[in-house]
Amino acid sequence: MSNPADAVAGRPAVAAPGLAGLVESWRQIVFSGNLAPGRPIDAVSRWLLITRACVFPMTLTSGLIGGVLAATIAPAPNWGYFALALLGLVIAHATNNMINDYFDTIGGVDTEAYIRTQYAPHPLFSGLISKRGLVATIAALNVVDLVIGVVLLRARGWPVAAFALAGLFISVFYVAPPLKLKHHGLGEPGVFLVWGPLMTGGTYFVTAGSIPGWVWLASLPYALSVTTVLIGKHIDKYEQDGARGIHTLPVLLGKDVSLRLNQVLMTGFYAAVAALVVSGHVGVGVLLVAAAIPRLRQVLKVYREPKPAGPPAGYRLWPLWYVSAAFYHGRLAGGLFVVGLVLNAALGL
């Protein structure tokens, strides 16, 4: 791989008939965030696009880290509560994505000329759903998450509410007034907290019933990885965000500094994993992440080179570029981290 195009390479646009064609459409959306030109949008594809399901693997990985850590240490992990927590996290992520699209649209950020409407169908601008329908869906999913939260709260106590409310606060006010965290360089730290301590720590807590201090540390490596994805996306939107007065971290730091920062954070993932092993908090199985270092080198090369003038053949997320590379690396690195934790649990490391 010399560029992120490999991560979202296109297949032929002609759809296979029947279920095979539908499954291929769903696969394309989940793995690339978009459909190849000419492919029809079925009911499932429509909702996968509306909720931006392509980024759900990050949430699943954060939750899995918490659950597998609990399996390693806790004497009697409750897998029913773990499954509820994981479902709640995915629903919350879907809701967050729709909240962002709604508030960015009514706030005038998302327009036909803005990058958000160019790399994938926008729920509102593409006619996938009406504003009223989007608000109703957001409300309905919040009710589902509330029910899940009440069940877990009754089972595990007040810390469940603390985790949930902290995540909801960051989720809503990421783009919603009056705080608009993204507009003041606080979106990236917020994502670090949500996909690290809150998701991983919260899932561990509901699975195990308690949370030792070292779990907070174990949540940090993958939190770094997810943060690089957001920074990469904001680098891609650097010029447009700056012109709109949206002071994301890359806008505040500058494009070149942000490119270097993401390289440091991606490399820092491996240093953080090694530190967990050396400190004795996590078993050596997680050193399996070293298998992702060749991909890291490829992605670092992307960050050192100028962005191409146009999209490579088969690349469907243009004009996004650096975010694809960060996600391409994080998907493998995070997956190997989870597999390494599973090895620790299975082998008693």
Image (cartoon, grey):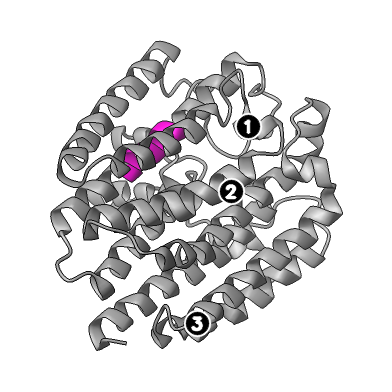
Mark 3 touches mark 2? (CB < 8 Å): no
Name the foreground residue: 186 vs 83.
186
Give the residue displayed 61% in from the left and 48% down from the top: 230
Q: Secondary structure at mark 1?
A: helix
Residue 196 vs 247, above or below: the answer is below
User: Is residue 28 shown to the viewer in this render?
Assistant: no
Distance from disc 3 to disc 2, alpha carbons, whole Å, reads: 43 Å
The residue type indicated by label 3 comes to Ser
**Apparent side of residue 222 relative to residue 50 in the rendered image (left or right):** right
The numbered mark, 3 or 1, whose residue comes first in the sequence reads 1
Which image quadrant: the C terminus? bottom left
Residue 279 vs 202, above or below: the answer is below
Task: Provide residue 76's location: percent of width, then percent of height.
Answer: 14, 67
Residue that label 3 marks: 279
Q: Which secondary structure is most common in the magenta stretch?
A: helix
Categorize mark 2 by other alpha carbons within 10 Å: few (<14), some (14-19), many (20+).
many
